[in-house]
Amino acid sequence: MKSRSKRGFTLVELLVVIAIIGILIGMLLPAVQMVREAARRTQCLNNMRQLGLSLHNYETAHKAFPPSRLNPDDNTLPSGVSNSGLSSAFQSWTTLILPFIEQGNLADTYDYRQPWFDNTNSNNFSAISYQLELFKCPSSPTRNGRDPYHVINAAAGDYGSINEVKKKVYTRVLDVPAPSSAGRIGLLGKFEKNPIASCTDGTSNTFFVGECAGQPDVYIARGRMTLDDFGNYSDDKVVNFNGQLVPEDGTGWADPDSGFSINGASSSGLDKYGPYMVNKINVSEVFSFHDQGASFAMADGSVHFVSESVDAAAFVAMCTRSGGEIIGVNDL
């Protein structure tokens, strides 16, 4: 009796199967990446929500929102903690809200009578070197970034307060007369308590906090800034420090200089006072690694994802607390 031999795959059939599997993997990978990015964006928005709620809890306790930075504004950075020889403000809103973001233990080690960078009379330097996940966007490629220049080893953060809109944004970008300083200031004004009543534009129409992710590395519209890009860069907010391009003002989550004074940027990100407000440069402007936009905490405690194609005038209106504009987040 003859036994039947089992027929296996031919080489052609095997190659067809491998090709089909490759096609399926190629179709599935983008979907998996999209799901992962959606999860990261949701976590980023949740971070923003927690920051917004903490600011409201601070307001409940102190009857005003904190200043974005505290006087004195000219504390010289000692050479032991800095390569810059510049100065910095005394404290940031981020250190003031530590007890309200479930960081009471860290706040207990912190001496608010000393500058935020102090490493002589307090444990402040150790505290601000601690990486707080709440201040990190999960989509940022710089997960454990540390300041190499302004305050050395300060743990980097990806979120900053909206402090003000610069005059030339109105005159050069929007082609309108610039309002007074009171009409250009953000809700977390510098050097002063900020009562909720000062937000006459409405808390649902005013940004609290925005993204500025990726520091201490410098990114522009097409990717990480190169030395060639730096040669065409027209502002003074980026410095070449030993061959590394870094923000001049600092990158730490506790650094008072890590907030925003909105200038707008060109399409390349290499020039300021342009009509682009989101995702053109991550130094003193809103920038994220999310697709086509960035996350914001609103002054009413809500959070929103704002498109990088947002109209400049609408964006500027949302940055100020008492500009008198008639606009809401649904107009973005």
Image: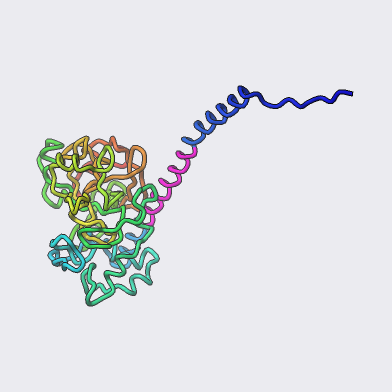
* x, y percent for residue 279: 28, 41
Q: Is residue 327 visible?
A: no
Q: Residue 85, located in which quarter of the rendered image?
A: bottom left
Q: Is residue 155 above or below residue 137?
A: below
Q: Position of residue 164 (x, y in %)?
A: 18, 51
Vertical side of 148 occupied by 23: above or below: above
Q: For this view, does 93 lie left or right of residue 86?
A: right
Quadrant location of the N terminus?
A: top right
**Quarter containing the C terminus:** top left
Foreground of the two, 33 or 327:
33
Q: Is residue 109 left or right of residue 259?
A: right
When the figure is inspected, residue 9 is found, relative to residue 216, above or below; the finding is: above
Residue under the image location 27 percent in, 62 percent down: 154
**Magenta segment boundaries in residue numbering:** 32-51
Q: Quadrant of residue 129?
A: bottom left
Whether residue 237 is visible here, answered yes or no, is: yes
- On the rendered structure, is 257 left or right of 52? left
The single residue placed furthest to the right in the displayed view is: 1
**Residue at 49% over, 39% down:** 32
Residue 125 place in picture, x, y as percent: 27, 69
- Which residue is at 38% across, 72% downward? 105
Q: Nearer the viewer, residue 1 or 62?
A: 1
Quarter occupied by residue 128 = bottom left
What secondary structure predominates along the stretch shown in magenta?
helix
Answer whether residue 35 is magenta in the image.
yes
Percent of width and height locating residue 71: 16, 66
**Which residue appears farthest toward the bottom when viewing the image?**
121
Residue closer to the observer: 322 or 226 = 226
Q: How many marks?
A: 0
Please say whether residue 255 is one of the residues in the magenta stretch: no
Which residue occupies 23% across, 67% down?
117
Residue at the farthest front position? 2
